[in-house]
Amino acid sequence: MLLLLSGLGLTVVGVPARGSVRLVDGSTREMSLAEPTAATVLSAVPWRSVRSPRGQRHLPVWYWSATTGGHVAYESRPELARLLLADFDPDVVGIAAQPFLVRDADSRHVPGFLLRRVDGSVVIVNVKPAEQLEVERVAETLAWAERVFCERGWEREV
C-alpha cells in the first residue's frame, strides 16, 4: 500500500482518507479528515444505531454520562469500562461514541470513542479484546487508522 502525505490529510494510492459523521437529522456529512473539529463530531450522533437484534453477541446500550450531560452508547462491557474511566477523568470534557466512519479506497473503520480534553486535544479510542488484536485484518485496520488519526493530529488508544 503506497502512502503519500498531503496538506489535506493522509493519501492512500492517490485517494485521501475521508470521514463521515451522522447528523442529528439522520443525514450524513462526508468531509476530508482535515475538516472535522471535535465540536462537529461531539454534536453528531453515533455512526451505528443502537439496536439489539436476536442472536447479537454484543450488548448495545446507553450510559448516562456526567461529562456530556446525556447518554453515550456503548456495545460491550469493555467499552463501558473505558467509558466510565473517561467519564470520571477531570481532563475529559467531551465524549462521542462511534464518532464517525473513516475510509479510503481499501479500508474503513468506526472508532469506539472520541474524547476531547480540557486542553483541546483529541484522543480516538478503540476497545478490542486482546485476542482480536492478533487477527490480521483487525491489526491492519487499527494500524491504518492510527496513521490516519496521527496525521490529523489526534492521539490514538487501543
Image (cartoon, helix red, strand yellow):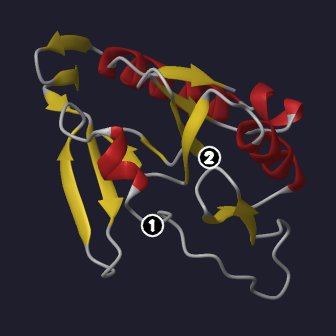
Amino acid type, callout 2: Gly
**Residue 153 is at least partly visible in this image:** yes
Residue at the (19%, 11%) spot, across then down: 5
Where residue 77 sits in the image (x, y, percent)? 89, 54
**Residue 13 is at least partly visible in this image:** no
The CA span between labels 1 and 2 is 13 Å
Amino acid type, callout 1: Val
Residue at the (75%, 32%) spot, across then down: 135
Give whichever of 53, 68 is nearer the camera. 68
Residues at circles 1 and 2 in contact by the CB criterion of under 8 Å: no
Residue at the (50%, 64%) spot, across then down: 46
Q: Residue furthest bottom?
A: 54
Vertically, is 48 above or below 37?
A: below
Give whichever of 91, 61 is nearer the camera. 91
Where residue 51 sits in the image (x, y, percent)? 67, 82
Disc nearer the start of the sequence (1/2): 1
Residue at the (13%, 14%) spot, across then down: 6
Can you say which quadrant of the picture contains the C terminus?
top right
Vertically, is 121 above or below 113?
A: above
Where residue 24 sits in the image (x, y, percent)? 35, 75
- Residue at image mark 1: 45
Is 53 displayed left or right of 32 in the figure? Answer: right
Is 25 displayed left or right of 69 in the figure? Answer: left
- Residue at image mark 2: 112
